[in-house]
């Protein structure tokens, strides 16, 4: 009302309350409605007053459909999901018009957030089915139990059809014309889950748990690909075979070495790591991500090693040079020369070998370069120190003259 008075509009108190209620108490939409009302100054109400300058309760009711916020937009994603999975509730004894209105309301609820509503329905529809089944089971109705199970099967089939339609909608074809079909199939899931009279979702609708599971899955796929790249020069296996056959055995080997009763066998563990191209993170972090069942989850993890053992392992690991393929790029090692093998030995194949003569020459050159650099630094240090002394003496002499 104060904003209307500042803008030259007289707003009645009951009209302001009705406007706030029609906009779902959204202050932004109320201000937008006031702006729309003030812009349409030429329109007159049925009683002859100017509805562009003043807002009365009667004028507001006449133009409410033009400025109010759609009811669907005021529904949260969780409330929309609940209305879909519960089906047609409260329609017993109603006419066809009320049934159609309920159907259209549920299809509109799907578009509150059509990007996630399918996952939300998938997360919650079985809870409604379970409630319907338990209700007839308490009564001891065998025929009712079979009917409830059949409805659960129909709801699952509808959910499967929804998945196929949404896959074509978001897949390579990008057939967005299937979006209304997806809304109908989501409503069909709730119709079968709640049965013709409608069901009830206990509590609030849960958020889609598939998103978290999919994130964990992608993370483990990425870690498995890293392990495969580290071990590809030693192990010839694809990612599933590496996961199923190699990792459990290797984890057992490292566990025996690091959790030894007589103390961790650090040197042997590092040698095994270098043999397969593994680094420290692979053993202490990534291996713990690939556990099979609840029994494996109860065993000791590499992250549970005491700090004393970890410190000893880190010191030993950093003090050694690791020439495995996984660490060559990180250490910046130079490529070795190629030496051709004789045809009688390897059939003319080329192998990466280290030329001992070149290695000795490079080591000698490095020693010469280090000695030369040391001499240069010594000369520069002497010059700078002597120059500094001369400057200091000059300053002292100048001070005495002054």
Image (spheres, helix red, strand yellow):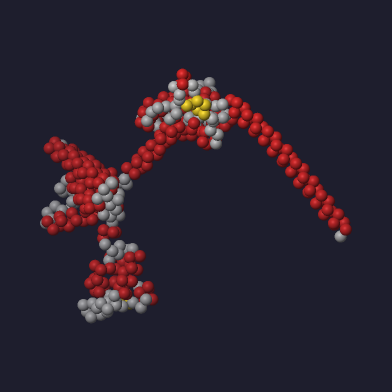
Residue 363 on image: x %, y %? 63, 30
Within the image, what quadrant is residue 157 found in?
A: top left
Residue at position x 40%, y 32% in the image: 290
- Left/right placement of residue 341 relative to residue 393 reads left
- Depth check: 51 or 376 in front? 376
- Depth check: 175 or 17 in front? 175
So how many labels did they put on this image?
0
- Depth check: 397 or 187 in front? 397
Quadrant (top left/top right/bottom left/bottom right) for the C terminus: bottom right
Seen as rendered, the residue at the extreme bottom is: 48
Q: Is residue 330 visible?
A: yes
Residue 330 on image: x %, y %? 52, 36
Within the image, what quadrant is residue 212 found in?
A: top left
Within the image, what quadrant is residue 23 found in?
A: bottom left
- Left/right placement of residue 335 relative to residue 65 reads right
Seen as rendered, the residue at the extreme right is: 401
Examine the rendered structure and indicate whether residue 39 appears above or below residue 359: below
Quadrant (top left/top right/bottom left/bottom right) for the N terminus: bottom left
Seen as rendered, the residue at the extreme top is: 344
- Depth check: 87 or 140 in front? 87
- Left/right placement of residue 140 relative to residue 217 reads left
Q: Is residue 82 visible?
A: no
Residue at position x 83%, y 53% in the image: 394
Residue at position x 77%, y 43% in the image: 382
- Left/right placement of residue 379 relative to residue 326 reads right
Residue 251 on image: x %, y %? 44, 27
Residue 75 on image: x %, y %? 28, 56
Residue at position x 68%, y 33% in the image: 368
């Amino acid at each position: 009302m104060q904003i209307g008075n500042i803008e030259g509009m007289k707003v009645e108190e009951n009209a302001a309350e009705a406007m706030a209620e029609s906009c779902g108490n959204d202050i932004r939409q109320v201000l937008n409605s006031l702006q729309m009302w003030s812009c349409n100054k030429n329109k007159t109400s049925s009683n002859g007053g100017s509805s562009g300058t003043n807002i009365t309760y009667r004028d507001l009711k006449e133009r409410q459909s033009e400025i109010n916020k759609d009811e669907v937009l005021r529904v949260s994603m969780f409330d929309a999901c609940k209305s879909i999975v519960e089906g047609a509730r409260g329609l017993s004894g109603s006419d066809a018009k009320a049934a159609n209105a309920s159907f259209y309301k549920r299809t509109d609820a799907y578009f509150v957030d059509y990007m996630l509503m399918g996952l939300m329905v998938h997360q919650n529809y079985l809870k409604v089915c379970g409630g319907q089944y338990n209700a007839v089971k308490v009564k001891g109705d065998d025929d009712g139990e079979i009917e409830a199970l059949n409805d659960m099967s129909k709801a699952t089939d509808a959910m499967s059809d929804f998945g196929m339609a949404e896959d074509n909608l978001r897949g390579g074809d990008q057939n967005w014309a299937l979006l209304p079909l997806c809304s109908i199939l989501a409503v069909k899931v709730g119709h079968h889950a709640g049965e013709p009279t409608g069901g009830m979702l206990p509590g609030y609708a849960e958020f889609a748990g598939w998103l978290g599971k999919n994130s964990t899955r992608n993370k483990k796929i990425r870690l498995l690909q890293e392990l495969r790249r580290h071990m590809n020069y030693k192990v010839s296996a694809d990612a599933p075979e590496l996961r199923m056959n190699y990792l459990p055995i290797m984890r057992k080997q490292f566990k025996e070495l690091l959790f030894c009763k007589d103390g961790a066998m650090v040197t042997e563990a590092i040698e095994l790591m270098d043999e397969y191209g593994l680094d420290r993170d692979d053993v202490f972090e990534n291996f713990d991500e690939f556990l099979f069942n609840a029994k494996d989850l109860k065993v000791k993890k590499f992250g549970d090693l005491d700090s004393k053992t970890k410190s000893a392992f880190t010191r030993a690991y950093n003090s050694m040079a690791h020439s495995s393929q996984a660490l060559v790029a990180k250490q910046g090692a130079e490529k070795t020369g190629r030496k051709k093998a004789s045809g009688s030995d390897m059939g003319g194949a080329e192998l990466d070998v280290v030329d001992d003569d070149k290695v000795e020459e490079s080591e000698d050159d490095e020693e010469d370069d280090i000695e030369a650099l040391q001499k240069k630094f010594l000369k520069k240090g002497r010059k700078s120190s002597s120059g500094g002394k001369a400057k200091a003496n000059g300053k002292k002499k100048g001070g005495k003259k002054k």
